[in-house]
Structures are given as C-alpha cells and as structure tokens.
Image (cartoon, rainbow, N blue to C red):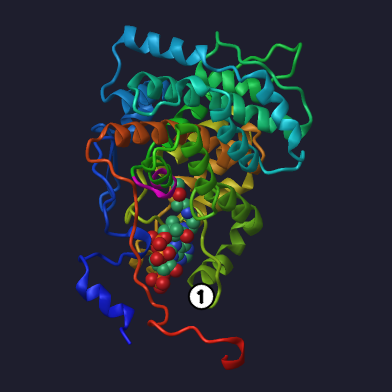
Amino acid sequence: VLDIRQLYAQTDCFTYDPGFTSTASCDSNLTFIDGGEGVLLHRGYPIDQLAENSSFMEVAYLLLNGELPKKKEFDDFEYTISRHTMLHQQLATFYSGFRRDAHPMAVMCGVVGALSAFYHDSLDINDAEHRKISSHRLIAKMPTIAAMAYKYSIGQPFLYPDNNLSYTGNFLRMTFGVPAEEYVVDPVIERAMDRIFILHADHEQNASTSTVRLAGSSGANPFACVAAGIACLWGPAHGGANEAALNMLREIGTVDRIPEYIARAKDKNDPFRLMGFGHRVYKNYDPRAKVMQKTADEVLKKLGVTDPIFDVARELEQIAINDPYFVEKKLYPNVDFYSGIILSAIGFPTEMFTALFALARTVGWVAQWNEMISDPKQKIGRPRQLYTGPATRDYVGFDQR
Ligand code: ACO
C-alpha cells in the first residue's frame, strides 16, 4: 500500500505555510509595509502625510494610477466618480428583499454582488477601458450602497446622491440627511471621515484583498470579486474588529475594570483577546492608529462629546503597551482601536462600522484587482495542501465496517 504522504517526496517542492505568514502571493507596487518599524507607504508616500494633506479621492487616484494627480487630472477624476454615484432604480428595490434588522454587511455583500447583474456593459476584464469603468462605478456607488443599507435599517427613505458635494460630504448627507430638510455638512466631521477613508484605503495582501485577488484570478468580474472581499472583511479578526473593539470598551466601561480584562487577555484558557490590539504584520505601533487617535480627539472636541470610553481606551492603551505580555508579543493598538470611538461619536451604529471600512477598502481592492489582471505573470490562484488523511485503502461494504 502506497502511503500518499510519500507522494509529496516525489512531486514538486512546495511550502507549508498556514495563514501565509511568510509567503508572497504576488508582486505589487501599490503599498509597502514595514511591520517592524510601523511604516505604511502608498506608492511611496507615508500614510501620515497622505492623511494630513490629501483627500480620499486623491489617494484613490494615486492607488489606481500610480502618481498623485495634477489639478486638472484630479478635477476630471472627481467629476467622473460623481457621474457614477447613482444606483440603478431596480437595485433600490432589491433592498426590500432583506429583513430590516439584517446586518449592513449582509446587505452590502448582496447588493455589490448584484451590481454585475446591472452593469453588463463593462464586464470584459481583458478590456482596460471596461476595467476602468467598473472600478469607477464601484468606488462611486459604494457610499450610495452603504448609506442606503443604513437608511433601510432605520426605516427612512433613501436619499439620492448630491453630486455638488464632495465624495465624503455626499456620503454623510445620504446617511444622516432626511428628505425636504437641508443637511449642512460639518467640515470637521467631513475631514475626519475622509481621513478614516484614507487610512482604510489599502493595506497590501490582507485577507480581504487576497480574497479579491484570488476570486479575480479565475477571471470573475470585479463586482463579484469585491462582494467576496466584503464577505471576508466582515470577520471579527479583520474588518469586524472596530465593532468588536468598541463593544469591548463599552463592556469594560470604567478605568478601574481594565486590569480584569488585561488579565483575561493574558489567560491562555480564556479565548478573550483585546480587540483593536495586535496585527499580523505590525510588530510596532500601527501608523494608522496614531492618526486615528488624533482624529478621535478632534472629533470629540468638536462635537462636545465626553465619552468615558475614550478615557478607558487611552488608559487601556497605556497599561497594555507597558505590560510585559504585550511588550514581549509586540501587541500594539491597530487602526481599529480608536476608529469605533470616532464613528460612534459621529452617529454611526456599530453595525455600520465594517460597512464603512468596506466602502474605503474598495479603492484598494479595485486597484489591486487591476494590477493583478494587467500583470502578464497572472495565473489562477491555486494553493496546495499538506494531506494528513488516510493512506490508500480498499473500499469495504457495510457488512465489513
Ligand atoms: N490580545 C491578547 N493576546 C493576543 C492578541 C490580542 N489582541 N493578539 C494576539 N495575541 C497573542 C496570541 O494569543 C498569541 O499568543 P501565543 O503566542 O502565546 O499563542 C500571540 O499573541 C500571537 O497571536 P496570533 O493570533 O498568532 O497572531 P496573528 O498574527 O495570527 O493575529 C490578529 C493577528 C488576528 C490581528 C490578532 O492580533 C487578533 O486577534 N487581534 C484582535 C483582533 C483585531 O484587532 N483585529 C484587527 C486587525 S487589523 C485589521 O484587520 C484592519
């Protein structure tokens, strides 16, 4: 009897790398991360400089096209995106098929996946112009789709996009505005929201981006691929972490209860983890977390919110980063630690947090998908496995089992 495991010795060499901790699936010139130093660059530009000085639309252009846009290029890009913000009216009726209490991410998976059933005219992935239109459509429609998911959940009518507003201002109005009432976009909130979108725009080969690439490697259309990315992002170890982090901070509630949770996080018999802490790649501060903390300060000040969970978050951060367990394992706050506090102060329910992440990450997903499709080395993704089942054996009938 041949032991199947012996076959591995006879076939091509392959690596066994659960979780792909040290396997590169592609080459890419979009985003660079130095996890040890806590550095994140998009096309060479440090994330803190982009967050401070640019806009989400500029970063979207940069990720898609490789360079920061000249003014005319930027105006044209912004105009093009604004021309694609509307959803097909039949897609609006699609929402009524969902339960009102459905999670927005469940709705987003469905609606984004359905886009390919409405925009057939641009599904040829080998045509660069088609890829461009689909990319613009996805980026432009995500705020409308996310805002409609929110409006549907609270039973309010949908608001059409107002293309005189900025990308982010338009999203805020579609989310928080009501028909027949003027909605004035607060510039501090708009800037904070735009910055949150910048911080989430791309992050090289994370789980959801790898999902988009893997789905796209078979030639699937970009709407279907992005729907797959949304499904992956939903998990609490990935995009769902900001929701989980805020829930955890609320559960802790007061500063005096922090030691109890720190002890739980260190207890190997307790599955509890400090949400918003730790990262597969960053073994230092996540550079996005620093910008996020500053933004949280600005937003809470502007809104006059004195939320005690912000004190809990700051104290927890100090205690954790000085604790030998967290120091040894290099566990630092990640981008999700403070984002929930900001989003909650702005008025988003926790269920919307991951939907906002999906909105922003769509830029990275489509940029990565385009890069992959244009790469002549592109192949269908097909990981191998290390078989650990039984060796070859003969079938036996019921009477012999
Ligand atoms: N709290 C307590 N201990 C932790 C935490 C945490 N948040 N994160 C990791 N550890 C410990 C693990 O128990 C493990 O300990 P061990 O070596 O004694 O077994 C060690 O640190 C390494 O953890 P892994 O799970 O192997 O690390 P991995 O790189 O696979 O996980 C992850 C990274 C998933 C982000 C993890 O740190 C985690 O679960 N964090 C909380 C969830 C979170 O904040 N996710 C958001 C990530 S950022 C993003 O997706 C945008």
Residue found 27% across the figure and 57% down from its top? 23
> Quarter of the image containing the C terminus?
bottom right
Residue 48 appears in the rendering: yes
Question: Splitting the image into 4 quarters, where does residue 150 fall?
Answer: top right
Disc 1 crowd rating (10 Å Cα; few below 14, some 14-19, many 20+) is few
Q: Position of residue 181 (x, y in %)?
A: 74, 12
In front: 188, or 270?
Answer: 270
| Whether residue 323 is visible | no
Q: Is residue 108 left or right of residue 194?
A: right
- The N terminus is located in which quarter? bottom left
Highlighted range, magenta: 205-210
Q: Which residue is mark 1?
A: 267
Front-most of residues 260 and 242: 242
- Residue situated furthest right in the rendering: 155
Q: Tally the numbered discs.
A: 1
- Residue 279 is left or right of residue 82, and the answer is left
Going by the numbered disc 1, the residue's amino acid type is Asp
Residue 160 is situated, as x and y percent measured from the top left of the image, at 66, 16
The part of the image, by quadrant, that contains residue 57 is top left
Dominant SS of magenta comes to: helix
Vertical placement of residue 90 versus 273, above or below? above
Residue at 77 percent across and 26 percent down: it is 156
Tag 1, which secondary structure? loop
- Position of 213 with respect to 376 (left or right) is right
- Residue 209's x, y, as percent? 40, 43
Is 392 placed above or below 248 here? below
Ligand 1 location (quadrant): bottom left
**Nearer-the-camera pick, 376 or 278:** 376
Residue 263 image position (x, y, % from top left):
53, 71
Residue 356: name its quadrant: top right
Q: Is residue 102 above or below residue 222?
A: below
Residue under the image location 67 percent in, 43 percent down: 103
